[in-house]
Every structure is written in structure tokens, then in C-alpha cells.
Amino acid sequence: MPGAEGVGVVTEVGEGVHEFAPGDRVGWLTINTHGSYAEQIVVPASGTVALPEAVDDETAAALLLQGLTAHHFTTASHPVQPGDVTLVHAAAGGVGLLLTQLIKARGGTVIGLVSRPEKVAIATEAGADHVLVSTGDAFVEPVRQLTGGEGVHAVFDGAGATTFHASLQVLRTHGTLVFYGPLIGEVPSIVMNEIPRSTRLTYGVTEDHIRTPEELRTHTGELFTLVEKGELIVRIGRRYPLAEAARAHTDIESRTTTGKLLLLP
């Protein structure tokens, strides 16, 4: 979701804004306007959060949207319970690395999928219990073997249509598929009465997790606290000058990147 988040210093506040003042370090989400590819931006106070001193600008910028996405998935879409076995697609990516750490913090087990061998160590460092190098649906049999044929409690699939049906196949009875990759390839279709093993399917939308300024600040506060305690590590994969935003998009599409990509003004 390009241009939906950023970090900076307040230079001016509008009429009626009392929770922020010039000089404050803040982060923001502008999910519906995508205006953050800029040196200066006007943002609504309702989508803005104060940044703790212990959280640096780059970490905060890298954490906001993807962190809230991972928080939503692991607390609402499928509230991870101790002992849950989960499958995380793109486990070395920005969301995947955060998902892995949040699942582990809640007592779950993570089987991570990565597209290249060189990404295995990155996913392992984040806490993944098992890491498989897989493309397409090649992960189905290895995941079944790792779970003794039972399948996983939840799959977090941001890989798009190419893995959708395979993800359903590795879920145990009443498992949950958290799908968030509709922009990668064609949107998959499914016949409702053909969903296997009474599994649940959800498409988590971050806006539903932060419907009010209070929810935004509560959830980001929980993430910042984990960072401050050293329990959540935000990996910055690459940094680009703002003028090279197009190159950052090309690199994302190449599937060679890991972690979060940042644009620096």
C-alpha cells in the first residue's frame, strides 16, 4: 500500500488540534489518500500517533502499517493461542517477519515459507521454528509431514492466488486462512460448499482494526512497547532516496527483498 504511512516532525497544527504541537515527532497513516511520497504532508490528527523517544524514526516508519497488519491478523483475524501451529507465507518479508515474532510472542509455532534459500536465515532469526523454501504449491506435503498429517491451525497467506487453494489444503479441521494477497495475480475464486474441513476464511482489512483514533493509539502503543522491550525487531531491508521510489517498487516486484523498504527524504 504505497504512500500510506510516514514519520516526521510537526511544523504546524490546524484549528481545534490539541493533542499535538509543533516540534512533536509523530507517525501517521493515510490509508485512503496515499500521500506520503512527499517531503511535507498534511495529515489528519485522527490518523496520527506520538512516537516514544526510545523508538527511532526508521523503526517507527517501518512498523506502522505492516505492524498494525500483523497485529490485526494475530489478535483478531486468528487470535493465536499457545500451542497453535501456523504457516506464514513470505516469512522473510516485512509483514512475514512481524507475523512470525507476534505469533511466537503469543506462544505459537511458526512454519515459515520463503522463496529463496538465502532468505532462510532471516526467517529463522525472527523466530520461525521451521523454514521451507517453496514456490507455488510445493509446500503442501512438507507442511503435512511437519504437522503429522494434522495440518496447521492458521495460515497467513500474502502470496496471492497461486497459493490460495494449497493453503486451504494444509489447514486442519476448523483452521483459519488469513488471506491478504489479492493484488498479487488474479483474485482466487472458491465454491463455498467445497471449502475443506470446515475451515474459516478471512480477508483482514487494517481499517477494520483501527476504526477510531483510540484504537490506532492503543494498538501502535502495544507494538512500540514490544520494540522498547526488545521483543519485536523491525528489519529494514533497504533504504532509498525519495526520488528513487520507482526503483523501490521494481525491487519489491523482483521478490529479492527482505524486511521493510524505506524512502528517505
Image: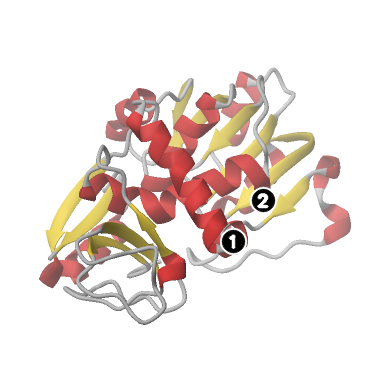
Establish if 262 lies above or below 85.
below
Q: Please, which residue is most extreme toward the bottom here?
A: 15
Q: Quadrant of the N terminus?
A: bottom left
Q: Which residue is mark 2?
A: 165
Residue 48 place in picture, x, y as percent? 39, 63
The amino acid at mark 2 is: His
Q: Secondary structure at mark 2?
A: helix
Q: Quadrant of residue 117?
A: top left
Q: Is residue 161 above or below residue 98?
A: below
**Foreground of the two, 119 or 213:** 213
Query: Which label belongs to residue 240?
Result: none
1 or 2: mark nearer the eye:
1
- Residue pictured at 39% horizontal, 57% vertical: 49
Amino acid under disc 1: Val
Q: Is residue 174 above or below residue 179?
A: above
Give the residue number, with chain letter if any, for mark 1. 205
Dot 2 surroundings within 10 Å: few (below 14), some, or many (20 or more)? some
